Image (spheres, helix red, strand yellow):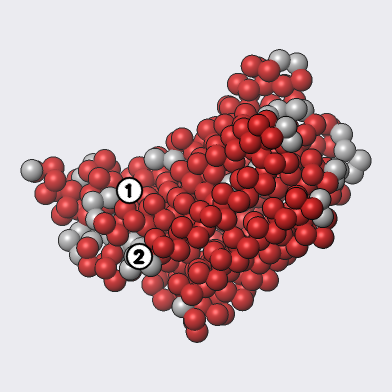
């Protein structure tokens, strides 16, 4: 019944991801374009939750060592999901506080984004750890593909639904749409968690070692540090555009809210196509080849967006969006399955927590750099569109740099370097 477990894992993944869709695909556009909030301020708000990303290492390690009612992952997934649902449901109310008072709006949004980000940190490390444990080494790539296939289908469906619910656009329609997304996410997540995780009364050997010692030991090998840096650069380049693509479309091409919301469905459809293609090609070409193709193609997509802004060309813009979806889809499955391979039995939660923290740091860096480059370059050039083009160019160059790091990453070497267990390393470091 592994297919059923994969389906349930995918439901949980879908539930958590759906709470981010209205934030990245609609609220960023509304706050920047309609409410006049600067991209830097939005970037600071959107990145605040990721300042808490180190808790992923703590949660992953703590869950490895302290099951609750025989369950290591489910309680933390549930906590995270509830926080995410609260965050997305309250987000539009907090955003419109900016109209009355700037500081009150900033504070309200900081609280809401904090709820969303903390929930994201709690849940993702837990369900990716569970996915790694349930799938086993041979089935991780297929599980990841399954999870992301369903995620993209859900994102496309929800983005189209949001576009319909926001037509005609009003504050009331925005509030109602975000609430429905939150309730849908909660229902899907609860359904996915039912009897998903097998109960176990065993406690991992790490129980006597503090999580700080474990985290320090996990970062003590060259391959671990290299992969951590690689993930940050790669994901910052890919994810940094999430908060900028819709405002760019609004300011460069005067697209309305409904049209920019539909961009998510276009991007998602292309992502979905190549997600399936990547899962099939990975067996023949290998993860590295797919990652290289995905990174180079994504850099090309960013270059196409730059050309669209310079020429004020809608065809080039939509081509860039399509290419982004296609090539990020290629890279995602291979990078995630590579991430799941960069773990060791008995410390899955710890390593997944470390890679989850890299993801959160990347979101922090991508959001902040994206917002500051957009505002800074736009102000210097006297044209906000120039700021978007500068960031797209920087993202393309960063992706090319990650290819140099990828050449030095070796799963076999990682396993060899961590052959001395994390517990033993921690014990030696603490005794020394």
Would residue 313 be found to the left or right of residue 206 on screen?
right
| Quadrant in the picture for the C terminus | top left
Task: Pick the residue in front: 200 or 152.
Answer: 152
Q: Please, what secondary structure does the residue beneath circle 1 have?
A: helix
Q: Residue at x 31, y 53 (%)?
A: 225
Q: Residue 251's image quarter?
A: top right
Q: Earlier in the sequence, mark 2 or mark 1?
A: 1
Residue under the image location 70 percent in, 41 percent down: 386
Quadrant for residue 82, please give it.
top right
Residue 235 sits above or below residue 369 on the image? below
Above or below, comparing residue 117 to residue 400 in the picture: above
| Disc 2 target residue | 409
Name the residue furthest right: 168
Indicate the position of residue 53 as horizontal and vertical percent values.
Answer: 44, 40
The residue under label 1 is 61
The residue depicted at 79 percent of the width and 53 percent of the height is 311
Q: Residues within 10 Å of mark 1 (few under 14, many from 20)?
A: many
């Amino acid at each position: 019944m592994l297919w059923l477990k994969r389906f349930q894992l995918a439901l949980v993944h879908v539930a958590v991801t759906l709470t981010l869709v209205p934030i990245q695909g609609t609220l960023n556009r509304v706050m920047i374009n309609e409410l006049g909030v600067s991209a830097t301020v939005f970037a600071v708000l959107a990145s605040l939750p990721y300042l808490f990303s180190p808790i992923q290492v703590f949660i992953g390690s703590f869950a490895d060592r302290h099951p609750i009612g025989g369950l290591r992952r489910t309680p933390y997934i549930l906590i995270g999901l509830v926080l995410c649902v609260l965050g997305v449901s309250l987000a539009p109310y907090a955003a419109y506080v900016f109209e009355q008072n700037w500081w009150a709006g900033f504070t309200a949004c900081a609280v809401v984004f904090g709820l969303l980000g903390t929930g994201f940190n709690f849940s993702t490390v837990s369900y990716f750890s569970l996915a790694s444990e349930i799938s086993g080494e041979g089935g991780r790539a297929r599980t990841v593909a399954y999870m992301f296939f369903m995620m993209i289908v859900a994102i496309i469906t929800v983005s189209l639904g949001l576009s319909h619910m926001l037509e005609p656009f009003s504050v009331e329609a925005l509030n109602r749409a975000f609430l429905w997304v939150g309730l849908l996410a909660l229902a899907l997540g609860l359904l996915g968690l039912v009897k998903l995780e097998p109960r176990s009364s065993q406690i991992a050997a790490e129980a006597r070692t503090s999580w700080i010692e474990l985290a320090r030991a996990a970062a003590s090998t060259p391959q671990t540090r290299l992969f951590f840096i690689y993930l940050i650069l790669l994901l910052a380049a890919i994810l940094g555009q999430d908060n900028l693509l819709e405002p760019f479309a609004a300011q460069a091409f005067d697209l309305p809210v409904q049209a920019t919301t539909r961009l998510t469905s276009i991007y998602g459809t292309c992502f979905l196509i190549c997600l399936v293609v990547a899962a099939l090609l990975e067996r023949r070409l290998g993860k590295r080849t797919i990652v290289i193709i995905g990174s180079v193609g994504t850099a090309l997509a960013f270059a196409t967006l730059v050309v669209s802004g310079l020429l004020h060309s809608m065809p080039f813009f939509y081509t860039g969006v399509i290419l982004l979806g296609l090539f990020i889809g290629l890279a995602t499955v291979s990078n995630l399955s590579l991430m799941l391979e960069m773990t060791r039995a008995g410390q899955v939660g710890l390593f997944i927590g470390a890679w989850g923290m890299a993801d959160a740091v990347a979101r922090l860096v991508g959001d902040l750099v994206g917002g500051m480059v957009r505002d800074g370059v736009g102000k210097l050039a006297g044209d906000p569109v120039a700021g978007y083009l500068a960031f797209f160019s920087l993202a393309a160059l960063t992706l090319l740099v990650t290819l140099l790091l990828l050449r030095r990453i070796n799963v076999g070497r990682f396993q060899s370097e961590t052959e001395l267990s994390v517990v033993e390393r921690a014990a030696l470091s603490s005794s020394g």
